[in-house]
Amino acid sequence: MKYLMMVVMLMFCVPSHASDYYFGGGIGLSKTNYDVTDDLKDNEFYPIMPLLKSYGHPIDISSDMNATASRIFIGKHLSPKFDGELSYDRFGEYSANMALSSGEREYGDHTASLSGTVAARIKSRALSASLIGYLDIVPEKLSIFSRVGVSYFKGDISGITRVDGRFDEHRASYVSTKHSTVRGVVPHIGLGINYKVNKQIALRVEGIRYGDVYDGTNIETITASVVINIL
């Protein structure tokens, strides 16, 4: 949080002209190395799965750890080679699903079946402060840049479990929901390329890595952005 405050002070407390500021937004992709199936296995429904699997019952686990990322930002040109920037970043929604089905089973004169699903969803976002440095490739036109900073990260994890069972003509269902929130201050680094269309508009493509957002988990994004300078 101290780094966030420092960037805010550089942007708004140091005397400047309106032309020193810029704003913009972008969209792209995000991915995480988080194994959401670990959360599924913590579910109270999971302990019966190894038993069912040992009897040949199919268990399907699928996950999608890619999502749509978006960001909006405002920044200040601190010098010809450095910018200070504040951004609001959304990482989209990651999901995982687990399902099992025992099928129809006979137990003497009785028949029974059991089926169930577990679904998990993760939504996350961050408020970030960055210091950006530029290196010209084509003066006043094309440059590469790197960023370093910190992010206040927040992630919401939700899950729902449903089990349906039948024994002869008797049926029963069980539904359970869970929700938890993860938050904290994490570092981020990035690398990109900046193309100046004219004095007012620039285009960016960059990749950013947010470190250790949750129990050793990282989030990476690649985005394309439009930058509008205030003239």
Image: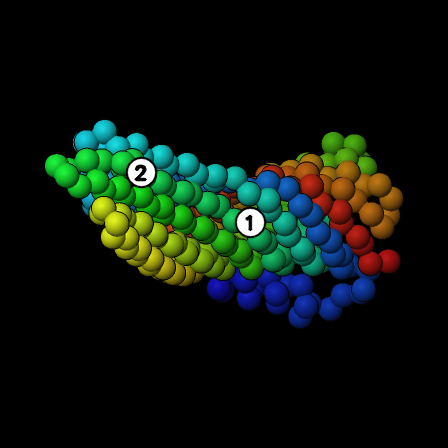
Q: Residue at the spot x=64%, y=63% of the render?
A: 10
Q: Which mark is residue 51?
A: none
Q: Residue at the spot x=41%, y=56% of the render?
A: 158
| Circle count | 2
Measured along the vertical axis of the image, is residue 23 above or below residue 41? below
Determine the CA span between mark 1 and mark 2: 30 Å
**Whether residue 95 is visible:** yes
Residue type of the residue flagged with mark 2: Ser
* Of 152 and 83, the residue lying toward us: 152
Q: Which mark is residue 101?
A: 2
Q: Which mark is residue 92?
A: 1
* Of 145 and 151, the residue lying toward us: 151
Measured along the vertical axis of the image, is residue 152 above or below residue 148? below
Q: Residues within 10 Å of mark 2 (few under 14, many from 20)?
A: some
Left or right for 125, reference 223: left
Question: How far across and how far down the image is residue 179, in percent?
Answer: 38, 60
Q: Residue at the spot x=36%, y=47% of the render?
A: 118
Question: How far across and how far down the image is residue 136, in percent?
Answer: 73, 36
Left or right for 89, reference 72: left
Residue type of the residue flagged with mark 1: Gly
**Whether residue 134 is visible:** no
Tag 1, which secondary structure? strand
In primary-sequence order, the first of circles 1 and 2 is 1
The quadrant the C terminus occupies is bottom right
Left or right for 123, reference 168: right
Question: How far across and how far down the image is residue 106, in percent?
Answer: 19, 35
Q: Residue at the spot x=73%, y=68% of the render?
A: 15
